Image (cartoon, helix red, strand yellow):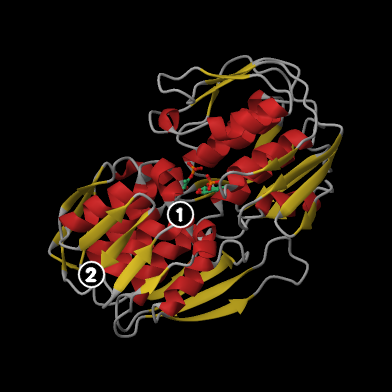
Amino acid sequence: MNLYSRSIPSLQGVLTVPGDKSISHRAAILGGLADGVTEVDNFLCSEDCLNTLRAMEQLGARVEVLESREGCGPVRFRITGVAMRPHSPSRPIDCGNSGTGMRLLAGMLAACPFDSEMFGDASLSSRPMGRIMSPLEQMGARIEARGSKPGCAPLFIHAGHVRPISYTLPMASAQVKSAILLAGMFAEGTTTVIQPAVTRDHTERLFRHFGVSCSVDGLAVSTEGPALPRAHDLTVPADISSAAFWMVAAATRPGSRLTLRQVGLNETRCAVISALRRMGAHMDIVKTSPEDAGEPYGDITIYGAGSLHGTALLPEEIPNLIDEIPILAVAGALSDGDLVVRNARELRVKETDRIATTAANLRAMGATVEEFDDGMIVRGGTALKGAELPSYGDHRIAMSFLVAGFSASGETVLTDAGCINTSYPGFDRDLSQFLP
Ligand SMILES: O=C(O)C1=C[C@@H](OP(=O)(O)O)[C@@H](O)[C@H](O)C1
Ligand SMILES: C=C(OP(=O)(O)O)C(=O)O
């Protein structure tokens, strides 16, 4: 599927982007493991999260659709959990394109008393799994990476029993942290993960929501097992990573005034807001969530005013805006300065090597980009020209460059844009409402 965009004067209106991908994965897993019935509202009905939900079904959870939204799909589910006794799956589990799905499920499966197998698409089969295998093996799990690339999926997980560990993460990864904490729920005693920097804390928040012990001491997160999560309804806020495309779109089109509703404002995910503000973007944020909401959310209004400026992303910000770097790079190219991205080597092991794919598409539109092992410098100040660009099968690359098309001369064509369904079903409809 190809999608098109072109230069537009400004963006006006109100938009509600779909539910948060990270929280939806975790809601499926914890709801599926819990004792009792959990209703999840505004679940992200994207391919990634539906795969995780289907995996939990294969493991014995009962999943019923309570509501579907037009043009999007099922968004409200009732999940009857297995009370920490997952069933042996009758066939290998398909994780599709999702690193989060595979790594988090691996943490849980490593502790289960049956063999299991997980596989994914070509992109997921080339992403590193050693980062979860190593700590899970230290906990006593036995995992084989059977992919053609060493350390890559398919993963074969032997029936196992896990013991608690204290583990220092070699990289700032919420997926690895969460895999260990999920395994820790099955282990007897205290499992601790020490992070090199603050990473998204949705697992910690959902643990508490489901009554699972979780304590945080600086960068160390601990849980006490064995745990029995208690079913508890929840509503997933809109995904700030999806909202980010429209934040940049509005901030870079003078005269825009766009409100994004009920966006997740968890501070471990909000660095895109600070970075855009440093670049000169004007935003009003009204927190609308109750004080005791597990995940804060609110409405963000972005105004397009003049030109954005360059900035350097701060090292500690990187894990908190990692998925927004491709769209921030587009903002950098449209600014009057340089966007400096360093300490972001993790970008090389996402759905694509996002340093390479972002740089290639920016260059194809006429921008200048200097690449480093751990990042890039995107030079602003050159007018972008429309081009035919590949998505490289990466949803964030596809959406970033359709937004770039709003500020480019001529037409921009994104080929192979079907990958957008990985995280943002309905993006094409939202896009078309701004196009002439
Ligand atoms: O835990 C999560 O839900 C995620 C963590 C991040 O990955 P890493 O943990 O590999 O940094 C992020 O890039 C991914 O989109 C979602
Ligand atoms: C990196 C991403 O997801 P995952 O690691 O779950 O594939 C993403 O959504 O940008």
Residue appearing at x 41%, y 44% in the figure: 421
| Residue 33 visible in this rendered orientation of the protein | no
Apparent side of residue 277 relative to residue 353 in the rendered image (left or right): right
- Whether residue 387 is situated above or below residue 281 in the rendered picture: above
**Quick one: SS at disc 2?**
helix
Instruction: Report the side of 200 relative to 419 (left or right).
Output: right
Q: Quadrant of residue 306?
A: bottom left
CA separation in Å, label 2 and label 1: 21 Å
Mark 2: give few (<14), some (14-19) or many (20+) Cα within 10 Å.
Answer: many
Q: Residues within 10 Å of mark 1 (few under 14, many from 20)?
A: many
Q: Which marked residue is nearer to the observer: mark 2 or mark 1? A: 1
Q: Quadrant of the N terminus?
A: top left
The location of residue 169, given as percent across then percent down, is 63, 44
Tell me if residue 103 comes above or below residue 381 in the rendering: above
Q: Nearer the viewer, residue 266 or 338?
A: 338
Label at residue 323: 1
On residue 407, the disc is: 2
Image coordinates for residue 303, horizontal then vertical, percent: 40, 81
For numbered disc 1, what is the local secondary structure? helix
Q: Amino acid at mark 1?
A: Asp
